[in-house]
Image (cartoon, coloured by chain):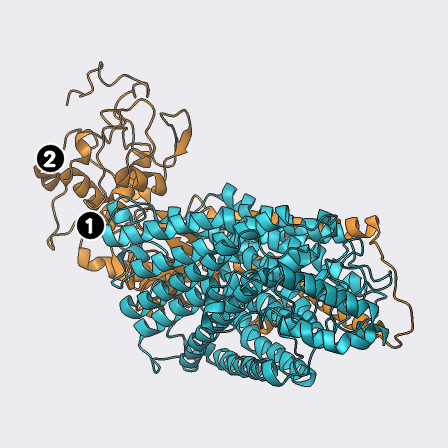
Chain colours: A orange, B cyan
Amino acid sequence: MNEFLRRLLHLPNQSSSIARDIDALHYSVILMTMAGVTLAAVITAIFLFRYRRRNAAIPLTKKIAAPVWLELLVIGGLLGLFGMWWVIGFSQYRTMQTPPADAMPVYVTAKQWMWKFSYPSGPTSADELVVPVGKPVKLIMTSRDVIHSFYVPEFRIKQDVVPGRAVTAWFQAIAPGTYEVLCTQYCGARHSFMRAQVIALAADDYARWLDAARAPLALPGAKGDGQATAFRDPHANSLVASTADAEDVRGPDSRGQPTTLAERGHRIAAERGCLRCHTVDGTPYIGPTWARAFGRRRATADGGEVVVDEAYLTQSMMDPRAVIAAGFAPVMPSYQGALSPDEASAIVEYIRALADAPPARPVPPPDGDITSSPARPTP
Amino acid sequence: MTPDVSTVVATVDTAHAVAVDPARAEAALALADDRSYLRAGSGIRSWLLTTDHKRIALMFFVATLAALVLGGTFAMLLRTKLLTPGPGFVEPVTYNRLFTLHGVVMVFMFMIPAIPAVFGNFFVPMMLGAKDLAFPRLNLASFYVYVFGAALTLWGMIHGGADTGWTFYAPYATTSPTDVAPVAIGVFVLGVSSIMTGLNFIATTHMLRRAGLRWFAMPMFVWTIYATSIIQVIATPVLGLAVILVALDHALHMGIFDPALGGDPVLFEHLFWFYSHPAVYIMILPAMGVISEIVPTFAKKHPLSYKALALSSLGIAFIGFLTWGHHLFVAGISQFDAAIFGAMSMFVAIFSAIKVFSWIGTLYRGSITFNTPMLYFFSFIYLFAFGGMTGIAVATTSLDIHWHDTYFVIAHFHFIMIGGTLTAFLGAIHYWYPKMFGRMYPERWGLVSAGLVFAGFNLTFVPQFLLGNAGMPRRYYSYPARYHMLNVMSTLGAYLLAAALLITLIYLVISLRWGRRASPNPWGSRSFEWRSPSPPPVHNFLVPFDPAHGPYAYDEPPPETHGGEAPPEAT
């Protein structure tokens, strides 16, 4: 039945974990609405024929008022039906919009007219996203120029990619294969040529691919798929890191490139002076610390609360005064235009990697007054 | 050119003579015809400087039909390109300009003014028993503002070749290498015209109803035009604001919407859809009004639940302001916003369903004659319900993610815009043609071309639903080969639709001169505008009508018609 309806409606294969559920709702909505439309048209046709004027001498029907119960039945019935679709649709929408906690992150940068995919463990690729089958993949996306939209018909996912923001989408491929990525937000002359591929590989094939992709980066001890635990910052205590420090600590590899995305993020953060105000060991300084921040809730100056996620971190770089963390002065300048989307993604990944950094010392109360307390720790 | 007092008195006397002495009807009819609004003055100045709402309506008629032909030509070029999946006879940039032109011309120059500025202008004063709109000179000004805006937009398109799509999404529109400002300003000017028209209808409905004509006794068409006008007056300024900010951003790099300069592109989407979603109701509500007039006339029966029909128009106008966010389900709005906008969108469908229910119920136990307007009504019921129900489908948040910005959405809104508004527009032309021009259109040609419009429309847009299901994005110059077959079907359907519309245009133009003369009330309607000669005199009525005989009072004896023979239903 599923397969028959899918072909009838020209839907693509169901190749992600959510596709089949989405299509089930699709079938019920389309079949019931089309049945309703057909019923309305058939009744209209019957009335048009049945009540055609046969004899002008027959007196005209007097005014008929629709009985209230019938009106209420029609309105109530439709409300109930639409309400049911709304509830099911919205619960699916929540699932589609909320990446699972264990999803593997991939950073996506869109530009006219190509897609670039960066893996936390280092490799980047253009127009080709290689993912393991059966593992949720979270895309952290931004655009370098105009709005694009990431769409994989077989996965039933789509997300506008907005410049200056980090937006997320996720999917879990359920079968190995190659799936086309189409840009669905009009983005200029070559909009219709802005296509990429998702290549879903079985777990062992994926591991082999990752090794091969990482080989040119030649890194000691680099393993795994770049999960947060893979990264440890040996200089977590360094509060004020200069460019020289960063070079010293990280050191570029033989190809002049640090190994993982988080390490690139660390180097960029040092070069751009982020670490002059943000610590990576849990101490609040001029700005909030980056350690153990990601994924947690944070009080804001206006009394609200915000979850520290990719979107919030990107916003804080590009428009720092939009949301001020409680207890901090709004002194950070905007890095709009100073940090490229790639660099911003690398810093986000660095902060994400610090989510589980071990505390170096007891953490002072978060509402500590930075102007009176000696913020700079002893080395 | 306004007749002086003595002329009016003479006209009234003539009408009385008709009522008293049927033998003189023929002569009186000829006399009335001479004084019809079409012949009240001659020469180009009597048209260009007229403040007669009927003449202004005809000028809008010509202008909007020209826009329809223009927008339709662009559509044919687009569909012709899409016959092949690869590069075609136009370059990608040209293609992008063509769909921008198609959208801008069809939305702002045809769909929005089509029914209100033509049929609303012509019939709202007649249905209220007024001699003209409340502000006749403002009405004339709105026409010239429209012409100026249209000329500016088209000049901007040819000169600068904007390729932003009619949606002007930032930051593409603010950084496009093409010249966006003239088009944006042109759209702004067209919006001003739309506001002027809406303002005039609101004032007219409140101030110029004939004594004794209660709100709930007005013809349904007036209700829908009134609801439309409210949207025009409230929402259009936001569109004006949004497009002017885009123009400023593009020309002066002010950084309002461009994130590279610190702006917010999603803010533009909110502002744009705050107008452009209610704009859908600016287009469809008058169409619903036309259908609400055609159905009782041909079924010879009072509409089922008049109040529900009237109030659901206001309901749509109100709820329509709270649904714009359903265009942003994949734009990165919060889940909470998506939930609210999804639910609100469903309510629009409830109000629309009430109307469909009422129209079908009106047919029940009617005495139905089947002319071309009725065929358009049948076509409308099917296409509008189809389009509306797919609207419910795309308002379901999880389903919209797959369909968003694909051909499914294209097909959905063309079902509403063409299947709904254009079908009703064609129905309105055939329904009121005898009244407006005093001639009949050829019935057989009417029925055949209405059937062809229906067939061509379905062949064009049903395949587009399937294309959307299959995942073909909109605004695609080049598409994967798997979408080829359905695109070919759609293009063939578009050619059929265009041919059918061309046939319609041709016989309507021919009938202007060679059509059979129409009686004042060829359909036997009880509505007020039919109680006047065809075509109406300058001041609309020879004798003021009596609103005590309501516009749908088919269970009462027919009211007196002044200026012609008795309605044919008695014969």
The chain holding disc 2 is A
Image coords of residue A186 (percent x, y): 37, 62
Type of amino acid at the residue the image marks with label 2: Ser
Type of amino acid at the residue the image marks with label 1: Thr
Question: Which residue corresponds to the image point at 83% horizontal and 71% vertical from the top-left?
Answer: B21
Query: For the residues marked 2 and 1, what is the alpha-carbon distance in whole angstroms?
Result: 20 Å
| Residue A85 horizontal side relative to residue A259, left or right | right
Residue A145 picture quarter: bottom left
Label 2 secondary element: loop
Label 1 secondary element: loop
Image coords of residue B366 (percent x, y): 83, 67
The chain holding disc 1 is A
Picture layout, residue B234 above or below residue B219: above
Residue A222, visible in the rendered structure: no
Q: Identify the residue under disc 2.
A: A242
On residue B55, which mark appears?
none
Q: Identify the residue under disc 1.
A: A259
| Residue B409 horizontal side relative to residue A351, left or right | right
Q: Are marks 2 and 1 on the same chain?
A: yes
| Residue B317 horizontal side relative to residue A268, left or right | right
Image coords of residue B177 (percent x, y): 24, 62
Image coords of residue A14 (percent x, y): 52, 64
Mark 2 or mark 1, earlier in chain = 2
Picture layout, residue B547 above or below residue A39: above
Quadrant location of the N terminus of chain A in the rendered image: bottom right
Picture layout, residue B146 above or below residue A375: below
Q: Residues within 10 Å of mark 1 (few under 14, many from 20)?
A: many
Residue B142, visible in the rendered structure: yes
Q: Which sits in the foreground, A13 or B181?
A: B181
Q: Residues within 10 Å of mark 2 (few under 14, many from 20)?
A: some
* 2 and 1 marks in contact (CB < 8 Å): no
